[in-house]
Image (tube, grey):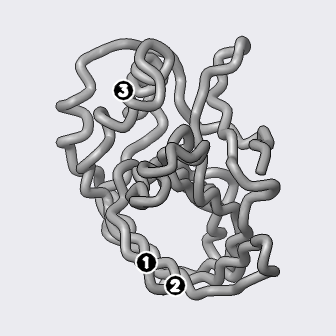
């Protein structure tokens, strides 16, 4: 499959500072647990699976700003090293469990927007066969949850991040289309 560029931009901004203390800080937001349904289209058809997302210790877009410079200067591997082990919560997607390495939460007009990134575990076959997917080391969820009701968003199972000329962070997804997150509810 050929990678397709998606127009999803993270809420990062430029700046280079010592970011380790920022990530050690605990925000005033309490832990939240969400349930949702993920819909992913593969070569074998469309599959739906349950999603449970536990978000703890999210950071703001302002706290994430130094990561843009890290990505710009060092690429995917530098960003992976900077966020890995961030311990920002857990993701359960079908039968797969993964820790959350980066969670950005920002209020926006009666809702909260989330950017959730995890460094995905590379499969033995990917490494052994040197597959193109090795260049897409992250899994990401972009979603919005209103103060009342349910939200929706997108799921990128294999993605990479890059800096555009205008300074925005671009999400490049390996598959043709990202998955959909539906009926996202706060438990």
Which residue is under mark 1? 96
Name the disc covering residue 27, or none: none
Q: Is residue 163 above or below residue 41?
A: above
Residue 34 position in % (x across, y down)? 49, 78
Q: Is residue 22 above or below residue 158?
A: above
User: Given contact means CB atoms under 8 Å apart, are the residues at marks 1 and 3 in contact?
Assistant: no
Q: Is residue 65 left or right of residue 132?
A: left
Residue 173 position in % (x across, y down)? 69, 47
Name the disc covering residue 78, or none: 3
Q: Secondary structure at mark 2?
A: loop
Residue 64 position in % (x across, y down)? 41, 33
The disc, 2 or 3, on the residue closer to the chain's N-terminal end is 3
User: Given contact means CB atoms under 8 Å apart, are the residues at marks 2 and 1 in contact?
Assistant: yes
Q: Secondary structure at mark 3?
A: helix
Quarter residue 124 falls in: bottom left
Q: Residue at x 35, y 70 (%)?
A: 90
Within-10-Å neighbours for mark 1: few <14, some 14–19, many 20+: few
Q: Nearer the viewer, residue 93 or 19?
A: 93
Q: Residue at x 50, y 50 (%)?
A: 129
Quarter residue 150 falls in: bottom right
Disc 1/disc 3 C-alpha distance (Å): 25 Å
Q: Secondary structure at mark 1?
A: strand
Q: Residue furthest front?
A: 129
Disc 2/disc 3 C-alpha distance (Å): 29 Å
Q: Is residue 50 visible?
A: yes
Which residue is under mark 2? 94
Disc 2/disc 1 C-alpha distance (Å): 6 Å
Q: Residue at x 29, y 34 (%)?
A: 81
The disc, 1 or 3, on the residue closer to the chain's N-terminal end is 3
Q: Is residue 175 left or right of residue 30?
A: right
Residue 110 position in % (x across, y down)? 66, 61
Quarter residue 67 falls in: top left
């Amino acid at each position: 499959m050929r990678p397709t560029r998606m127009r999803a931009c993270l809420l990062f901004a430029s700046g280079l500072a010592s970011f380790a203390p920022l990530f050690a800080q605990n925000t005033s937001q309490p832990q939240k647990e969400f349930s949702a349904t993920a819909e992913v289209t593969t070569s074998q058809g469309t599959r739906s699976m349950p999603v449970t997302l536990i978000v703890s210790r999210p950071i703001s877009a302002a706290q994430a700003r130094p990561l843009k410079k890290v990505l710009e200067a060092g690429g995917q591997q530098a960003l992976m090293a900077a966020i890995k082990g961030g311990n920002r919560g857990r993701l359960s997607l079908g039968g797969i469990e993964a820790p959350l390495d980066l969670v950005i939460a920002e209020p926006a007009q009666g809702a909260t927007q989330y950017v959730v990134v995890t460094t995905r575990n590379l499969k033995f076959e990917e490494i052994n066969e040197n597959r193109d997917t090795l260049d897409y080391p992250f899994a990401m969820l972009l979603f919005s949850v209103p103060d009342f009701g349910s939200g929706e968003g997108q799921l990128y199972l294999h993605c990479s991040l890059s800096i555009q000329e205008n300074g925005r962070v671009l999400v490049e997804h390996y598959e043709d289309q990202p998955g959909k997150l539906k009926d996202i509810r706060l438990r």
